Amino acid sequence: MNRIPPYLLITLAAISCGHSDLHDIAVPRPVAYHRITIPDPAYRIAKAGPVSIQLNASVTDTIVTAGNSWVTAHYPGLDASIYITVTEISPDTADESIDNRIERMSLNTGGHPTEVISFTTPAGLDARMTVTRAGSPTPVQFMATDHREILVSGAGTAGLSVTAPADSLSPITGMLERDITHLLKTLTPQ
C-alpha cells in the first residue's frame, strides 16, 4: 500500500487552509453585462440662433428658435442628451443672467463633489463647465458668454438613476464631458 509522506500532507494542508495566489485569480462570471458603445469624437456644425455649435455626428437634434434658441441633442441608444440654450443678452442684463446660470449649476450638483473647469475659448468666450461624477441627473453642466450679447448654457444628462454607482455612469459622463468641451471650444458667434 502506498503511503503519502507526512511532509506532503502538511504542505497540502497549508495550501488549502492558507492564503495563496490562487484566490486572486479572476474567475469569469456566468452572467456579464454588455459594454455600452460610446460614439467616436466626430462632429458636425449646427446653427442655433446667433451661434454655430459643433455636435457629435451621432446625435439626433432638434433646434427651436423663438427669440432664444434651444437645442436638444440626443444620443440614440444611450439615453443621454445635451440640452443647450442660446440666450441673447445685453450688457445691462449680462451680469444677472450669468449669476443666475452659475447659481443654477451649483444647485443642480445636489451638493455632491463637483469639478469646476473654467477657460477662455478660441473665440474669446468665457466658459465654465462642471462635472459631477455621481449623484446628479445632470453630470455635466456648462455655460459660455461674451458678457455682451450671447450666453450659451446647458447640461448633459444621463438616463441612468442618480443612485447608480459612479463607475456605471463613468462612460456616459466621460462622453458628455468630451463632447461638451469640444462644443465650448468650437463655439462660434455669427
Image (cartoon, rainbow, N blue to C red):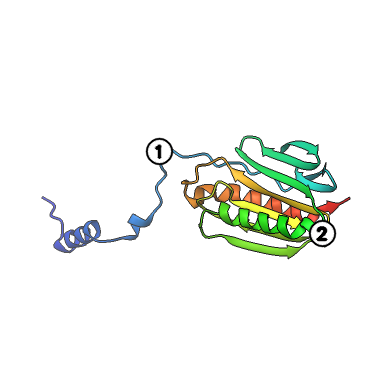
- Which residue bears the numbered disc 1? 30
Q: Position of residue 83 (x, y in %)?
A: 68, 43
Residue 33 visible, this orientation: yes
Q: Where is residue 185 drawn, in percent x and y?
A: 77, 57
Q: Position of residue 157 (x, y in %)?
A: 61, 44
Kindly identify the amino acid type of the residue bearing the numbered disc 1.
Answer: Pro
Q: Secondary structure at mark 1?
A: loop
Choose top left, top right, bottom left or bottom right for residue 46.
top right
Picture disc at residue 82:
none
Tell me the kind of residue under disc 2: Pro
**Closer to the N terminus: mark 2 or mark 1?**
1
Q: CA distance from mark 2 to mark 1?
A: 62 Å
**Residue at the image point whose x is 70% and y is 51% from the top:** 180
Residue 137 position in % (x across, y down): 55, 46
- Front residue of 157/86: it is 86
SS assignment at label 2: helix
- Is residue 41 or residue 143 the one in the foreground? 143
The local crowd at label 2, few if under 14, some if 14 to 19, many if 20 or more residues have their Cα within 10 Å, is few
Is 80 above or below relative to 105? above
Name the residue tied to disc 2. Answer: 91
Is there any visible trace of residue 145 in the rendered image? no
